[in-house]
């Protein structure tokens, strides 16, 4: 239902997006996962028709931007921008009603208020809402035209866990009705929870793609040992140890992918103590998408 | 799905609500012009002191000869009707007429209510009595007129209305759009199938609603505090104001089309409005500027608006007499709106 071919966006001397291809099938949720500055927002804004690509093109529902069908495309997409400030002085109901009037068809204002659980706040001014409520209004405004395709740019950044859950909930319900979603995030939990398929982005490029399970499988094991040796050692030597699948570094720490903590830890510790290497840190956790990103780039998703 | 939604209505209502819910806006739109009108109206209850200007009615060359050399008087020769008109418009303080025979009786026509009129009359009389026949006084007669709309406040009030319409239209639109762009609200709108023209028209329409209130405020104040009456039709006054405000609103849109920061918008607004404050005859008649640049001055949108307002308020002119002014305002508005639509940036 949508695809991007060879998308490039160049600003004066910065290449924000450097040749991204995406395919989107109906009903799926595609996540663009990557740290700040990876080019996720620029990619999505090119898909939304808000930013003109330097080269490459976007095709939505078989139509391309700038060929005379722009409003037809816009009528079928819903957009929640990063940090949208909707009209401060208007009430929730007024904002939703105003946006509804732009679409040839869609949900009624009442339906949106119900769906977003905003009925109690319908007469509250937008600027008096909490962050989570504002985000629900932004989602409501994105869904009021009953879009076939929903774009969410960092939908839960800055929200508390409860508000985040309620956003996930709303998106899940939209998908149950057959909606298709493209979202950007730098929260791996969000990508893992919501997305069928994830494209990992870094420095304007798509560096890996797959379902959350597939991406984690590339690590070779489902559990990780994270250690920080007191002196510098070669991570490769640790990868030789039986039960260790992969070794990667993240700053001064070493991440070892293992099949099973219980069997892998003793030989790892023995290996270190044989060489007289002390440990400044030792931890274990289940493999996450963050670990995938670390193994791909050597940096964490939220490292600066 | 029985609900019906009109984007133009919703956008316009949104604008109105935003304005009404912002106390600061309300002061700038209503409070400021009223304060200004009261202040200036009191300060300049009459025309500021100036070299008296005298119109000599054609046919009495001896008067012209006598007065032309006089220091302290501005003299021009006009036909009888034109002279009467000039007096009414407060372009001259005094009309002097006499027959072609030197020394014949001189008729002074002026408005006693105006300081300038009396001053001009006595200065002119002194010059004539002295220069012609110092031994034999010239007979004089005074014709006092109180022309409608000839006081300074009558002149000033339409100017203030024009100024206010310009300011509130340009600020009200330019500033809020630039702010919305900065907050990425425009970008959010751009991602919807909203018609661009609806968005811009909503700004114009919301301005028009406030315009009626502003106009009523200033005209009402003028009447109650200073006894300024509208001699023409109120409908014509309203229509001219609407046209003027729309044309300035379009200019405001044009400025806001690309400007990224509120500061830059301020600068552009001032750059465009300040010269017109002076050149368009708000506080004094632009006829005081050199003859050669007057066609340019009359092509300014504020000049056209104020001229039309004065003609309606003070002279009771009908719309049909104001073709030039209406044309000038329409041209500015249409061109600016078209360019704004074309150049407008949503981010």
Image (spheres, coloured by chain):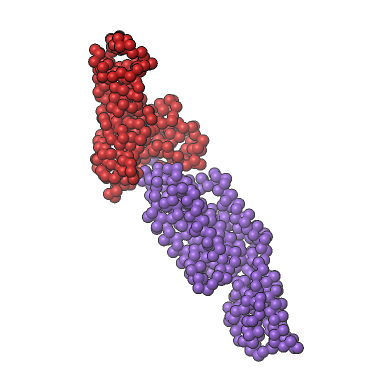
Q: Position of residue B91 (x, y in %)?
A: 60, 72
Q: Is residue B194 left or right of residue B144?
A: left
- Visible residue check, residue B148: no
Q: Residue at x 47, y 63 (%)?
A: B329
Task: Work out whether A269 lies above or below B112.
Answer: above
Relative horizontal placement of residue B26, taking residue B113 as reference (left or right): left
* Residue B220 picture quarter: bottom right
Q: Position of residue A197 (x, y in %)?
A: 28, 29
The front one of A288 and A85 is A288
| Badge count | 0
Please name the residue shown 66% across and 80% down the image: B70
Above-or-below relation of B62 to B246: below
**Which quarter of the image is occupied by the N terminus of chain B?**
top left
B148 vs A187, nearest the viewer: A187
Residue B292 % position (x, y): 50, 73
From this view, report whether residue B322 is shown above or below residue A96: below
| Residue A237 visible, this orientation | yes
Residue A198 locus on image (x, y percent)? 29, 29
Q: Residue at x 51, y 35 (%)?
A: A128
Query: Which chain does the red colour mark?
Result: A
Quarter of the image for residue A2 reads: top left
Identify the residue at horizontal 40%, vertical 30% (top origin): A156
Work out which residue is located at the far right of the displayed protein and give it: B135
| Colour in which chain B is drawn | purple
Task: Find the residue positioned furthest to the bottom.
Answer: B101
Q: Is residue A297 above or below residue B283?
A: above
């Amino acid at each position: 239902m949508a695809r991007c071919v060879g998308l490039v966006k160049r600003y004066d001397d910065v290449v924000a997006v450097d040749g991204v291809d995406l395919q989107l099938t109906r009903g799926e949720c595609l996540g663009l996962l990557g740290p700040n500055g990876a080019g996720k927002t620029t990619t999505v804004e090119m898909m939304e028709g808000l930013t003109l690509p330097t080269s490459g093109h976007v095709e939505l529902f078989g139509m391309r931007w700038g060929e005379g069908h722009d409003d037809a495309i816009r009528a079928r997409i819903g957009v929640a921008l990063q940090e949208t400030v909707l009209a401060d002085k208007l009430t929730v109901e007024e904002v939703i009603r105003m946006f509804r009037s732009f679409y040839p068809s869609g949900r009624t204002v009442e339906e949106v208020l119900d769906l977003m659980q905003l009925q109690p706040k319908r007469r509250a001014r937008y600027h008096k809402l909490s962050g989570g409520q504002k985000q629900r209004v932004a989602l409501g405004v994105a869904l009021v035209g009953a879009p076939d395709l929903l774009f969410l740019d960092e939908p839960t950044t800055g929200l508390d866990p409860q508000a985040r859950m309620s956003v996930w909930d709303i998106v899940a319900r939209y998908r149950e009705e057959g909606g298709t979603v493209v979202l950007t995030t730098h929260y791996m939990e969000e990508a893992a929870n919501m997305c069928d398929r994830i494209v990992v982005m870094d420095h304007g490029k798509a560096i890996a793609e797959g379902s959350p399970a597939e991406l984690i499988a590339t690590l070779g094991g489902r559990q990780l040992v994270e250690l920080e040796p007191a002196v510098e050692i070669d991570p490769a030597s640790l990868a030789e140890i039986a039960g260790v699948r992969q070794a990667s570094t993240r700053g001064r720490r070493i991440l070892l992918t293992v099949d099973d903590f219980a069997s892998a830890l003793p030989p790892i510790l023995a290996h270190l103590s044989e060489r007289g290497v002390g440990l400044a840190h030792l931890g274990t956790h289940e493999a996450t998408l963050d670990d995938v990103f670390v193994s791909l780039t050597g940096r964490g998703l939220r490292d600066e | 799905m029985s609900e019906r939604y009109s984007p133009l209505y919703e956008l316009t209502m949104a604008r109105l609500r935003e304005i009404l819910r912002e106390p600061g806006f309300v002061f700038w739109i209503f409070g400021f012009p009223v304060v200004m009108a009261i202040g200036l109206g009191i300060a300049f209850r009459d025309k500021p002191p100036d070299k008296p200007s005298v119109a000599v009615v054609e046919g009495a060359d001896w008067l012209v000869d006598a007065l032309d050399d006089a220091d302290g008087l501005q003299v021009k020769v006009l036909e009888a009707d034109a002279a009467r008109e000039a007096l009414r418009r407060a372009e001259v303080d005094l009309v002097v007429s006499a027959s072609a025979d030197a020394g014949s009786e001189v008729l002074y026509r002026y408005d006693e209510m105006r300081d300038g009129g009396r001053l001009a009359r006595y200065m002119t009389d002194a010059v004539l009595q002295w220069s012609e026949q110092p031994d034999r006084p010239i007979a004089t007669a005074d014709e006092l007129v109180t022309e409608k709309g000839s006081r300074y406040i009558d002149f000033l009030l339409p100017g203030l209305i024009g100024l206010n319409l310009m300011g509130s239209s340009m600020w009200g639109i330019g500033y809020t759009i630039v702010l919305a762009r900065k907050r990425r609200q425009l970008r959010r709108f751009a991602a919807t199938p909203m018609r661009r023209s609806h968005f811009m028209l909503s700004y114009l329409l919301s301005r028009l609603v406030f315009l009626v209130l502003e106009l009523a405020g200033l005209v009402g104040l003028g009447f109650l505090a200073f006894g300024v009456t509208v001699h023409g039709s109120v409908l014509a006054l309203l229509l001219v104001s609407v046209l003027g405000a729309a044309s300035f609103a379009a200019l405001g849109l044009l400025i806001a089309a690309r400007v990224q920061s509120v500061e830059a918008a301020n600068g552009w607004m001032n750059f465009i409005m300040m010269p017109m404050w002076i050149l368009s005859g708000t506080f004094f008649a632009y006829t005081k500027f050199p003859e050669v640049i007057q066609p340019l001055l009359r092509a300014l949108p504020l000049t056209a608006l104020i001229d039309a307002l004065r003609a309606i308020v003070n002279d009771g002119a009908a719309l049909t007499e104001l073709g030039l002014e209406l044309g000038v305002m329409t041209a500015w508005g249409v061109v600016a709106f078209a360019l704004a639509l074309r150049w407008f940036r949503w981010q």
